[in-house]
Image (cartoon, grey):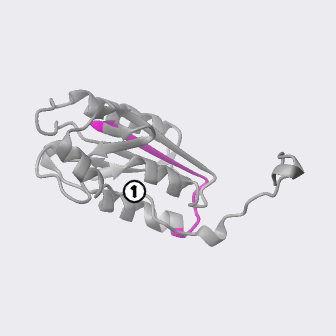
C-alpha cells in the first residue's frame, strides 16, 4: 500500500537493558507490531532500533522529523517507543536509548517533546510509550539534565490560536 504523505509514524525500540536492567525482547516485537499497524494505516514510517547493535541518538530522531515539521506537511505524527523508561516526578518521563556509556542525546525528554508537539503546527501528535516508569538512581538524576526532546523548536509563528471567551468572572481578570 502506498503511504499517505501527510501521516508519519516514528517507530523507536531499544531492546537492550541499561546497566543492571534486563534486555527487553518484547520491545522488538512491539516495534514490529506497531510498524505493521502503521503500514496498514498507510503511514510513512521511520524506524530506529538497536537491533544488530545499531546506535542512534535523540538528535538522529529529531533530524528525521524536522524536515516534515518545517514543511508543515503533516496532518498527523505518531511516535511509538518500546524500551526502558524512567521518571523523576509527575509528568517528567524519559526514554532510554542506551544500555551503558550514557551521554547527551542518549535519553529522550518525553515532557519536553510533548510541550514542543503543542507548538509544532501538526494538528494531531500521538506519543505511545511501551516503557516502564521506574525512578532512577543518582546517576540518572544527573543524566536527566542532558535529556533531549525529539521534536524541533519550530514554526511558532505558524500556529493559530482560536480566541475564546474568558470563563473567569470579570472581578478575577
Q: Quadrant of residue 157?
A: bottom right
Q: Quadrant of residue 22?
A: top left
* Quadrant assignment for the C terminus: bottom right
For the point 23% across and 60% down, the residue is 104
User: Which residue corresponds to mark 1?
Assistant: 150
Q: Is residue 100 above or below residue 69?
A: above
* Left or right side of 128 for 147: left
Which region of the structure is painted magenta? Answer: 70-85
Residue 92 percent across, percent down from the top left: 40, 43
For the point 47% across and 42% down, the residue is 127
Q: Residue furthest bottom?
A: 157
Task: In this rendered view, identify the residue nearer to me: 152 or 134.
Answer: 134
For the point 53% across and 39% down, the residue is 41
Residue 57 percent across, percent down from the top left: 26, 57
* Left or right side of 152 for 55: left
Residue 98 percent across, percent down from the top left: 19, 47
Residue 149 percent across, percent down from the top left: 39, 56
* Left or right side of 91 for 147: left
Task: In this rendered view, identify the residue nearer to me: 47 or 151.
Answer: 151
Total tally of numbered discs in the picture: 1
Amino acid at each position: 500500500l502506498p503511504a499517505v504523505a501527510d501521516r508519519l509514524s516514528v517507530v523507536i525500540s531499544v531492546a537492550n537493558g541499561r546497566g543492571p536492567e534486563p534486555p527487553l525482547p518484547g520491545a522488538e516485537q512491539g516495534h514490529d507490531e506497531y510498524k505493521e499497524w502503521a503500514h496498514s494505516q498507510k503511514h510513512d514510517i521511520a524506524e530506529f532500533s538497536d537491533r544488530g547493535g545499531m546506535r542512534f541518538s535523540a538528535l538522529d530522531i529529531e533530524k528525521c522529523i524536522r524536515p516534515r515539521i518545517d514543511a508543515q506537511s503533516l496532518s498527523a505524527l505518531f511516535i511509538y517507543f518500546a524500551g526502558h523508561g524512567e521518571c523523576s516526578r509527575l509528568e517528567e518521563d524519559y526514554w532510554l536509548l542506551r544500555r551503558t556509556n550514557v551521554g547527551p542525546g542518549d535519553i529522550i525528554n518525553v515532557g519536553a517533546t510533548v510541550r514542543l508537539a503543542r507548538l509544532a503546527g501538526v494538528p494531531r501528535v500521538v506519543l505511545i510509550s511501551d516503557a516502564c516508569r521506574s525512578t532512577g538512581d543518582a546517576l540518572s538524576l544527573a543524566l536527566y539534565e542532558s535529556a533531549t526532546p525529539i521534536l524541533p523548536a519550530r514554526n511558532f509563528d505558524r500556529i493559530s490560536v482560536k480566541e475564546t471567551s474568558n470563563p473567569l468572572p470579570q472581578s478575577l481578570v
